[in-house]
Amino acid sequence: MRIAISAGHGWRSGTYDPGALNSKFRFRNYPTLTEHLVNSEIVRIIKSILKSQLGSDLISVESMGLEKKVEIINQLGVDLAIEFHLDSSEDKSLEGCKVLYNPSSEQGKNYANSIQKALCTGVSRRKDLGTREGYFRLDPSRGTLYFLRATKMPALIVESEFISSSKAASEFQDGFLVEKLAFDLSEVLWEIWKRS
Ligand SMILES: [Zn+2]
């Protein structure tokens, strides 16, 4: 089984899209906490944790524009594709994790449930907002759900937290939330890979 992982947003035709951000918080040595930075770091850590076990079965795909990225993932013909995002809301008290899947794949729904469970019961201990079908947004310029619709394999969007939540943002800034999320995701991907 081959798995592709990728951080949402980032570079697209020469412009940089940071995704959602929370300017009240810093991230590592960057002045602002952004969705793309957090998820790029999660992808990097997962790769380093799973390198020796999964080897070339785990592929990280760079941000390069959503349509180009989907085209590359389809060409790779992986068995599972995951894009990492963070949610954002005007309501700063909203927090928790959810995983979106393409409802045309029962297998994808099962993977979504496994990942959701890992992030809510593992070391990350996120509030469980549940898995849900994510197929309805058809316009690629509107972003993330195109990833689910246009990929030709079970595909997931993991929204591991609300970047707008002050509590979560402070865990990204001063805690080890990135490391915890990457650890739980590595564990569950390792399980999924072993089962295949
Ligand atoms: Zn996003």
Image: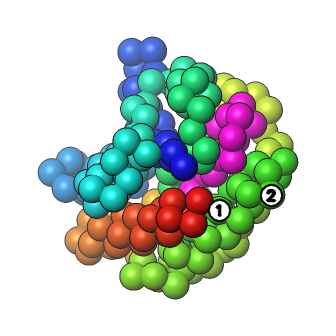
Query: Could one spot residue 121 in this view of the protein?
Result: yes
30 drawn magenta: no
Please tell me which residue is depicted at 28% across the width and 60% down the height of the picture: 49
Q: Which residue is mark 1?
A: 111
Q: Position of residue 151 (x, y in %)?
A: 68, 34
Please tell me which residue is depicted at 54% across the width and 49% down the height of the picture: 1
Q: Looking at this view, is 29 or 31 the one in front?
A: 29
| SS type, badge 2 | helix
157 drawn magenta: yes
Q: Which numbered marker is on residue 166?
A: none
* Highlighted range, magenta: 146-161
Mark 2 residue crowding within 10 angstroms, few (<14) / some (14–19) / many (20+):
few
**Location of the C terminus (image quadrant):** bottom right
Q: Which residue is mark 2?
A: 106
The type of residue carrying mark 1 is Tyr
Left or right: 172, with 63 as reference point: left
Residue 22 drawn above or below residue 59:
below
Q: Position of residue 43 (x, y in %)?
A: 37, 50
Q: Quadrant of residue 48?
A: bottom left
Q: CA distance from mark 2 to mark 1?
A: 9 Å
Q: Earlier in the sequence, mark 2 or mark 1?
A: 2
| SS type, badge 1 | helix
